[in-house]
Image (cartoon, coloured by chain):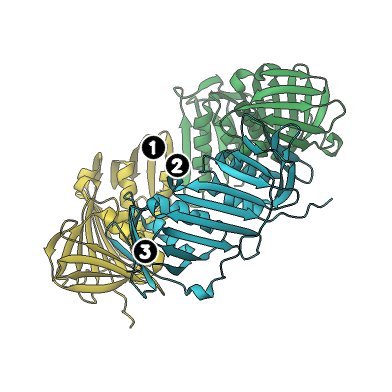
Chain colours: A yellow, B green, C cyan
Amino acid sequence: MMLKATIDADILKESIDAISALVTECRLHTDETGISTRAVDTANVAMISFHLKKEAFESFSSTKSELGLDIAKIKNIFGMMGKENLLALELPDEGHKLKVSFEGYQYSITLLDPNTIRKDPNIPNINLPGKVVLSGSELNNAIKAAAVVSDKIALGIDPATQTFYMVAEGDTDHIRREFGKTEVNFINGAEARSLFSLDYLKDMGKVMSRAEEVELSLGIDHPANFSFYLAGGNGHVEYLLAPRIEAD
Amino acid sequence: MMLKATIDADILKESIDAISALVTECRLHTDETGISTRAVDTANVAMISFHLKKEAFESFSSTKSELGLDIAKIKNIFGMMGKENLLALELPDEGHKLKVSFEGYQYSITLLDPNTIRKDPNIPNINLPGKVVLSGSELNNAIKAAAVVSDKIALGIDPATQTFYMVAEGDTDHIRREFGKTEVNFINGAEARSLFSLDYLKDMGKVMSRAEEVELSLGIDHPANFSFYLAGGNGHVEYLLAPRIEAD
Amino acid sequence: MMLKATIDADILKESIDAISALVTECRLHTDETGISTRAVDTANVAMISFHLKKEAFESFSSTKSELGLDIAKIKNIFGMMGKENLLALELPDEGHKLKVSFEGYQYSITLLDPNTIRKDPNIPNINLPGKVVLSGSELNNAIKAAAVVSDKIALGIDPATQTFYMVAEGDTDHIRREFGKTEVNFINGAEARSLFSLDYLKDMGKVMSRAEEVELSLGIDHPANFSFYLAGGNGHVEYLLAPRIEAD
């Protein structure tokens, strides 16, 4: 058996949601320690690095292998499920059909050929000196508020006032959200300010809203890195988002 | 007075929902024992036989007559109603306007001429040897799960394993739901398997989901018959659904 | 400072909803006693007179001035807000940007030039002898029920039976809602009957549904005047709605 595991449906859903914020298919790597994936969106603007330890599963055994996953098909399962919430996953050696069982149902999903999916991207070597840790739901609320007036948002750190700020400028209106010392834990208050597309941030924000803490790393006109845990600490996500050019 | 009755709105709603799963208008037969209708959908694929005993009403008196009912107009009432839930129905002799009263409202519905509605279909004489009784909500859940991967579903009985199964095949995926002895009461485990359109089953499934028990009769490439009670046993519905040709 | 105030978000929302039932922008008058507006819809069918006393605010100070308000922009705020519900409003002297602060957010809204907005309409001098006081939610329920069968509704008072009635005629159906003495307080049971567009009444009805009492003044083929309080009695709304010609 290439893969044989049972997992709480909520944990799998949280994991799949994190991936599907950026891509519709991915190369899933499995080995005896768990599963992981790394993928960039089609426009090369955002990257996800995802890892789920075997401790996140009820039971887990896997050989080292690579699976091509159609995310939408996995999402279908959650629409089918009732109250009970344990999923069994099974993939025979040399198999290309993943069997998902739950509540008397047997759902068979044909896997994609991993070679048809983009190779794992390399993690770029970027120095992001500004670091701030804040609540995922507060971060998501600010992203949603910004999206009401604009399609882009500036994220920045002001070392003088020790504040993290998010600013969105609309045609005639603007909105600013400041997080002072009582709302964030500064790890490193270096000056930072970059502009980002809200298209991406809105999808990421929904996922991050469930995380108690998100560690955000920023530079000046540099990418942003959002790092957070899920599945009770047994899952980890990093989103790396490229900046937009700030028009004057 | 041709018809004078009061009825709990929930019971009338359940009854109208059962009929509207297949048709938008019907010939309603009334006599001193209650009301009934039999109708086929426009494509001649599905038939409903419906009967509601006078015991389902708070009060009921009727002469033998035939009413042409526009189902959508009756459904409008439920959108108008508040918390209180007793409806009074009144149809004068020779009248063609049904008066529906509730909570200070008087709603007058012009009936259709019964002669403009298709004649009551005959019940075909079909032998369906496979019989199984199962929970309406489990049946509906399996229908909804199948609809995620396909537009048709096979229903079958395997006498060897004494299981009832539902299988839907998508382009690349398939889903199978098996009901073993602990989930169903077999009345007759004769071998059966037929393919049905999920278009029809989805609408029927919503209605059947409220029934504690649905008696399902099947054959091999034959119609399926779904029989169940509503209104605390005072109402009865039978859906007869034609099979689709199984393509190889 | 031209205006500096704090207000419970629910009270501001209720007020803005009352105005936005008719218009998308308005001239808001402020002085030391509170804020007010009077506006007609673009088709000149309905007028709102709105007043919110300074007692409706947590704190309030204002000079006499006129603000051009884009209603949609104010409504955006409610979509951004979380649980906490105190809004601070601030408009500097000679300023044309209204600052709205809440929960760490600063939202800056560019005001419209009041001269680009229609002048305040005069209140026409109309004698409406029929008066009835009834529950706003009952009134709204009857409006919703009428909208199911027609796009217009007759409102009338029958002095003989001391009833207020609402009648909607569809192509084949009609619905009538009568309010007897137990459901309304008659102030003046003069005969009245006029026909009104449900397009307008549906939007007004949603707003009025929150008012415990609505005072409705009617004539024969004359406008209707709906008068009610909000914000615990510190806000007052009057809707004046022109009648439609009753076709025979």
Q: Dot 3 corresponds to which residue?
A: C62
Q: Dot 1 corresponds to which residue?
A: A102
User: How packed is label 1: few (under 14 Cα within 10 Å), some, or many (20 or more)?
Assistant: many
Q: Position of residue B197 (x, y in %)?
A: 62, 42
Q: CA distance from mark 3 to mark 2?
A: 57 Å
Closer-to-camera residue (A192/B202): A192
**Residue B35 shows up from this direction:** yes
**Viewer-nearest of discs 3 and 2:** 3
**Pointer 3 indicates a residue of which chain?**
C
Q: Amino acid at mark 2?
A: Met
Q: CA distance from mark 1 to mark 3?
A: 64 Å
Q: Position of residue B161 (x, y in %)?
A: 47, 26
Q: Tell me: residue B38, above or below residue C54.
A: above
Q: Position of residue C203 (x, y in %)?
A: 58, 52
**Pointer 2 indicates a residue of which chain?**
A
Q: Is the Cβ of the residue at disc 2 closer than 8 Å to that at disc 1?
A: yes
Q: Is residue A173 left or right of residue C196?
A: left
**Viewer-nearest of discs 2 and 1:** 2
Q: Tell me: residue B222, above or below residue A179.
A: above
Q: Dot 2 corresponds to which residue?
A: A80
Q: Amino acid at mark 1?
A: Phe
Q: Amino acid at mark 3?
A: Ser
Q: Position of residue B148 (x, y in %)?
A: 50, 46
Q: Secondary structure at mark 2?
A: helix
Say which quarter of the image contains residue C31. bottom left
Which residue lies most toward the left here?
A188
Labels 2 and 1: the sequence-earlier one? 2
